[in-house]
Amino acid sequence: MELDHIFICTKKGAPEAELLKAFGLSEGSKNIHPGQGTANRRFFFHNSMLELLWLESPDEAQSELTKPTGLFERLSLPDDNISPFGFCFRPGDKTETATPFPAWKYSPVFFPASLAVDVGNAPLEEPMWFFISFLSKKNPAEMTEPLDHDIGFKELTNVTVSIANSTAFSVAADKANNLEGFNVKRDGAHLVELEFDGGMRGEVHDFRPTLPLLFRW
C-alpha cells in the first residue's frame, strides 16, 4: 500500500486553509459529503493530497451509517486525546487487492453502491487509518486540479505523525509505520510533519498553533 491523502480536522469552513494559501499553496476543488456530514477544502500534490475536513452536519455524522467511523468525535469537540488526522492508503500496485490491516467496510451514500472504504480497527487516540482499493496514483478526476504551487512543492516524500498517548499501536498503525517514508511515533502532542521533494532545500515552516502541521522542503 501507499499513501493517497491526509486529512486534518478543522473548524467549520476550514479558515485554516487561508494560511496554506498565504504560504504559497494553490487550492484545489472543494467537496461536500452528503450523508456523512462532512465537507472539505483540498490541496493537491503530484503524488498525494492534503484535505482540511470539517463537520458540516452533526446529525448526518451521528447517523447509524456514519457514527462508527468516529468522524463526529474527531471533528466536533476539542479533545487532546483524540487524533485530528486521517490517512488514506491506496494499493501500491495492481496486484494488491486485500486490505493490509484489520478493517471494516464503510459504504458512504456518495459512493456507488458496489464500492466501500476499508476503515482500520484503531482507537480514536490514533489517526483514522483507511484503505480504498479502487484508487490509483493517477486518478483521472484529479488531473485537472492545480498541482503546481508558488512555493515549488512537487511530491510528498516523507510523513511523520505524532500520537499524543503511550498506548500500544494498532495493527493499522504498525503497518503504516513499516512503509518507506512513513513514520508513526508517540509524542506529547498530535502533529503531522510533511517532507516534500526529499527536503532538498533544508527549509521548515510550522503552522502551529493554528494547524498541527509542519512542512519540510
Image (cartoon, rainbow, N blue to C red):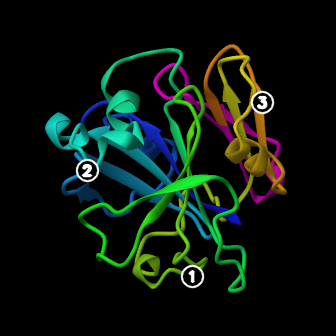
Would you call the spot at circle 1 few (<14 residues within 10 Å), some (14-19), or many (20 or more)?
few
Q: CA distance from mark 2 to mark 1?
A: 26 Å
Element marked by disc 1: loop
Q: CA distance from mark 1 to mark 3?
A: 30 Å
Q: Position of residue 3 (x, y in %)?
A: 65, 60
Q: Earlier in the sequence, mark 2 or mark 1?
A: 2
Q: Position of residue 142 (x, y in %)?
A: 44, 76
Q: CA distance from mark 3 to mark 2?
A: 30 Å
Question: In the drawing, does residue 93 fall left or right of residue 62?
Answer: right
Element marked by disc 3: strand
Residue 176 magenta: no
Would you call the spot at circle 2 few (<14 residues within 10 Å), some (14-19), or many (20 or more)?
many
Q: Nearer the viewer, residue 108 or 183?
A: 108
Q: Is residue 83 above or below residue 18?
A: above
> Residue flagged by tag 1: what amino acid is it?
Lys
Q: Is residue 192 above or below residue 86?
A: above
> Residue flagged by tag 3: what amino acid is it?
Lys
Q: Earlier in the sequence, mark 1 or mark 3?
A: 1
Q: Residue at x 30, y 26 (%)?
A: 76
How many numbered marks does the figure carry?
A: 3
Q: Which residue is mark 1?
A: 138
Residue 185 numbered tag: 3
Q: Is residue 96 above or below residue 9?
A: below
Can you tell which quarter of the image residue 140 is in? bottom left
Residue 36 numbered tag: 2
Q: Are marks 2 and 1 in contact (CB under 8 Å)?
A: no
Rendered-image quadrant of the N terminus = bottom right
Q: Earlier in the sequence, mark 3 or mark 2?
A: 2
Mark in the foreground, 2 or 1: 2
Residue range in magenta is 193-217
Q: Position of residue 171 (x, y in %)?
A: 72, 44
Q: Residue at x 54, y 16 (%)?
A: 81
